[in-house]
Image: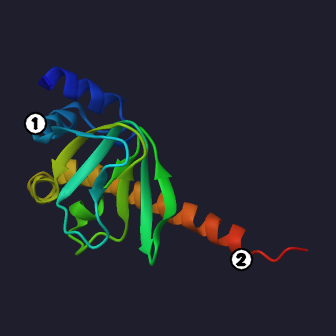
Amino acid sequence: MSIEIVTGLLTEHPFTKGFWPDHVARLAAMASEARFLRNELIFHEGDHSSLFYLLISGNVALEVVSPGRPVLVSTLYAGEVLGWSSVTGDSGKQFQARALEEVHALAFDGARLRHACEEDYAFGFWFMRSILSVMSGRLQAIRAQLLEVYTPVA
């Protein structure tokens, strides 16, 4: 995939909203293409995957593995991100990720992204601001799920 195509995909991705053109160019230089087939496991719960993904197309299930079967926690769609813990340096993955259909994504090495953030504070600010927005949205979604499950029926 050419750098021009990658730059175009990044420019259109919601995660990079507000990024400066040179920040998008920096990300484009670090991107690699990733594709997953329907039902393919992207990573297992507990894995130490170092990859961060920007989903371009397709849906991904985030699941908790319980005895007998995985339990769906959330579904991620095109325009969302996967694997933000790779950027924060957290230990193992909290969930299992599985492609619900063919998935096309841009993949980034988490350690390389952390280094880029340390090397260029403006880039790091915009990147981490976007990561925090993702984390906040995920916490709000889980809170809504918990309220739905535990709200007493009148």
Snapshot quadrant of residue 146:
bottom right
Q: Judge by depth and name the residue closer to the eye, 117 or 59.
A: 59
Q: Residue at x 20, y 48 (%)?
A: 123
Q: Residue at horizontal 33%, vertical 53%?
A: 82
Q: Position of residue 14 (x, y in %)?
A: 40, 38
The vertical placement of 69 against 127, above or below, is below
Question: Looking at this view, is 106 or 124 the one in front?
Answer: 106
Residue situated in front as seen by the camera: 122 or 51: 51
Q: Nearer the viewer, residue 109 or 40?
A: 40
Amino acid type, callout 2: Tyr
Q: Give me the disc on residue 29.
A: 1
* Horizontal relation, residue 150 to residue 117: left or right: right
The extreme right residue here reads 154
* Front tag of 1 and 2: 2
Name which quarter of the figure residue 66 lies in: bottom left
Identify residue type, mark 1: Ala
91 left or right, relative to 150: left
Q: Position of residue 122 (x, y in %)?
A: 21, 49
Residue plotted at (28% across, 33% down):
10
Q: CA distance from mark 1 to mark 2?
A: 46 Å
Residue 2's quadrant in the figure? top left
Q: Which residue is farthest front?
A: 68
Applied colour scheme: rainbow
Q: Residues within 10 Å of mark 2 (few under 14, many from 20)?
A: few
Secondary element at tag 1: helix
Position of the C terminus by quadrant: bottom right
Residue 37 to residue 45: above or below: above
Q: Which numbered dot is residue 150?
A: 2
Residue drawn at 32 percent across, 70 percent down: 45
Question: With 55 as the anchor, is 7 left or right in this view?
Answer: left
Measured as percent of width and height from the top left, residue 56 is found at 34, 35
Closer to the chain start, of discs 1 and 2, is 1
